[in-house]
């Protein structure tokens, strides 16, 4: 998203923040953001100094949770940075979301560009990160697999998928750490899986042992190419099941003619979750970008 940026001088008092009349087409409709949550009704706020645009920020509302919103894509011209423009944009975005009935806001920003501090000053607290990972499919990156598992390919939804995903995420993902209702989480995942299977290229590869589904991985031709990614039952870790599943997914994408595969994986702030170590250290994936997700109740 690009706006004409002015180098003209201005004071913070003369700063004006307005809503862009026409939202760029790429932000229309429903969008899954880098924090893996889906949002609608994007709006762009721009800051004007000396009659020209000096910065912008985007807000949106979370699908299925009207009291939750998003602030992201904060941009300020370098010549006007650290003059309070960033905070004023965030405060205006927060106010606008509040007027829409939002009670909880996620602030999403690219790590390494010094934006976290602006959110932090306004009461946002970082709580997780999202990592963008890519694989070069012209190379065979997964070296170790376990032939003991029976692999099956699925082109339609199965009830077991959601239970395996919830089981695999419980030790790491915040909602399950906090004791969220397992049945509600499974229902939400079932709905998402059913929607994903509308895409005829979408596949789930599941591993079985003694008739039990012990892990799965998905794949599709649209990005991100792995949506849920590798999910392994907690009591089957450390048995090369993750790498066996990942090989099935990447092999399918390679056979479909893709040269590059991409996924987004969530992680804690202090250390990467096991899924990310699997994707990178064990399977040759490259970390491209990291996003910090911050949260505030209003």
Image (cartoon, rainbow, N blue to C red):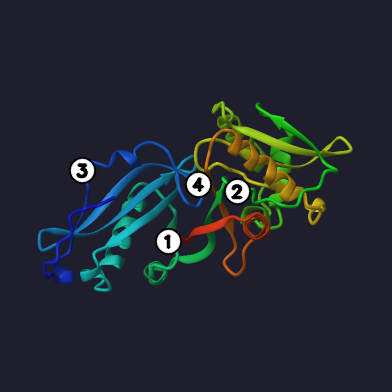
Where is residue 228 drawn, in percent x and y?
Answer: 61, 44
Report whether 240 appears left or right of 257: right
Where disc 4 sits, the SS reads loop
Query: Mark 1 highlights which residue?
Result: 110
Viewer-side label of 3, 1: 1
Q: Distance from label 2 to label 3 (Cα)?
A: 46 Å
- Earlier-in-chain disc, 2 versus 4: 4
Q: Which mark is residue 187?
A: none
- Earlier-in-chain disc, 3 versus 1: 3
Viewer-side label of 1, 4: 1
Q: Distance from label 1 to label 4 (Cα)?
A: 16 Å
Residue 99 showing in the rendered view: yes
Q: Which mark is residue 37?
A: 4
Where is residue 194 drawn, in percent x and y?
Answer: 60, 30
Q: Distance from label 3 to label 1 (Cα)?
A: 26 Å
Where is residue 88 drawn, in percent x and y?
Answer: 27, 65
- Earlier-in-chain disc, 2 versus 3: 3
- Earlier-in-chain disc, 1 versus 4: 4
Q: In the picture, residue 174 is in which quadrant?
A: bottom right
Where disc 2 sits, the SS reads loop
**Nearer-the-camera pick, 288 or 275:** 288
Where is residue 275 drawn, in percent x and y?
Answer: 66, 55
């Amino acid at each position: 998203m690009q706006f004409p940026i002015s180098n003209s001088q201005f004071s913070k008092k003369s700063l004006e923040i307005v809503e862009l009349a026409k939202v760029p087409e790429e932000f229309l409709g429903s969008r899954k953001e880098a924090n893996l949550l889906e949002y609608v009704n994007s709006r762009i706020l721009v800051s004007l100094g000396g009659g020209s645009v000096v910065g912008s920020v985007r807000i949106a509302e979370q699908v299925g949770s009207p009291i939750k919103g998003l602030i992201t894509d904060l941009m300020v011209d370098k010549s006007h940075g650290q003059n309070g423009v960033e905070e004023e944009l965030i405060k205006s975005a927060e106010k606008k979301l509040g007027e829409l009935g939002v009670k909880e806001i996620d602030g999403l920003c690219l790590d390494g560009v010094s934006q976290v501090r602006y959110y932090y000053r306004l009461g946002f607290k970082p709580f997780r990160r999202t990592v963008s990972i890519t694989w070069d499919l012209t190379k065979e990156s997964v070296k170790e697999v376990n032939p003991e598992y029976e692999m099956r390919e699925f082109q339609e939804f199965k009830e077991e998928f959601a239970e395996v995903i919830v089981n695999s995420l419980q030790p790491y993902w915040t909602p399950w750490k906090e004791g969220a209702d397992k049945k509600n989480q499974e229902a939400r995942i079932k709905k998402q899986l059913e929607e994903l299977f509308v895409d005829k290229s979408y596949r789930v590869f599941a591993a079985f042992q003694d008739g039990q589904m012990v892990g799965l991985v998905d794949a599709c031709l649209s990005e991100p190419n792995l949506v849920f990614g590798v999910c392994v039952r907690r009591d089957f870790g450390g048995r090369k099941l993750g790498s066996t599943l990942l090989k099935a997914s990447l092999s399918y994408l390679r056979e479909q003619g893709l040269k590059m595969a991409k996924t987004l994986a969530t992680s804690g702030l202090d250390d990467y979750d096991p899924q990310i170590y699997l994707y990178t250290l064990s399977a040759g994936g490259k970390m491209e970008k990291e996003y910090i997700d911050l949260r505030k109740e209003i």
